[in-house]
Image (cartoon, rainbow, N blue to C red):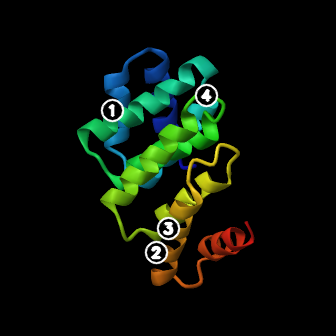
Amino acid sequence: MSSSKDYESVELLKQIEAGDFESAVNLVANLDVESATTILVSAANELSDFDSISVYFVVEELLRRNETAELHKVAAVLLTNIFPLRAGAYNQALHHLEKAIQLEPDNIRLQEGILFFHDIPEKLLSDMEAEKYAKRILEKSPKSKAANEMLKLLAHE
């Protein structure tokens, strides 16, 4: 992480811990998407369980200001990787990926990401939905490992 990212990460942590969400949102809003994602995930990992959900609040506020597929993806990453044990986290993450796909319907990586929700114990993505996504992915990216593996899995069920 560059020194600029280190500084921004420390500032974000301070702002969240102080409850200064307006400043935290403004800090992240002024970053490029890659830097914002890195800093948000890092902050969520650094904060206590109680405070770490505040990072998700920052993303939600950013989405209210400017809804983008990338921000929905960040929210989904936080929910599945940082907060997977919180009730409803996977359901909410799936919702964020569905919204991201609505905003960027040709984004293959988002569609590949949504296939994850078929393989979890809760199986939030039905066989029919998984097949639909896999076929849509393969139309544009015939070598997609995720889509090909999903169709193989569905053929054996």
Q: Residue at x 39, y 59 (%)?
A: 101
- Crowdedness of circle 3 by 10 Å Cα count: few (<14), some, many (20+)? many
Q: Secondary structure at mark 4?
A: loop
Which residue position holds label 4?
86
Q: Which residue is mark 2?
A: 136
Q: Find the distance from the CA under tag 2 to the CA under tag 1.
A: 31 Å
Circle 1: element type: helix
Side (left or right) of 122 relative to 34: right
Farthest residue, direction left = 65
On the image, the x and y values in percent for residue 62 come to 32, 38
- Callout 2 secondary element: helix
Q: Which residue is mark 3?
A: 133
Which amino acid type is shown beneath numbered disc 4?
Answer: Arg
Q: Is residue 4 visible?
A: no
Disc number lying in front (3 or 1): 3
Task: Characterize the local packing of mark 1: few (<14), some (14-19) or many (20 or more) Cα atoms within 10 angstroms.
Answer: some
Q: What residue sits right under mark 1 in the picture?
A: 61
Q: For mark 2, does the 10 Å Cα neighbourhood hold few (<14), some (14 to 19), or many (20 or more) residues?
A: some
For this view, does 31 lie left or right of residue 76?
Answer: left
Quadrant for residue 22, please give it: top left
Of the numbered discs 2 and 1, the one sitting upstream in the chain is: 1
Spot occupied by residue 77 in the image (x, y as percentages of width and height): 54, 46
Marks 3 and 2: CB-CB under 8 Å? Answer: yes
Indicate which disc, 3 or 1, sits on the residue closer to the N terminus: 1
In front: label 4 or label 3 = 3
Q: Is residue 130 left or right of residue 34?
A: right
Question: What's the CA distance linking mark 3 and mark 2?
Answer: 5 Å
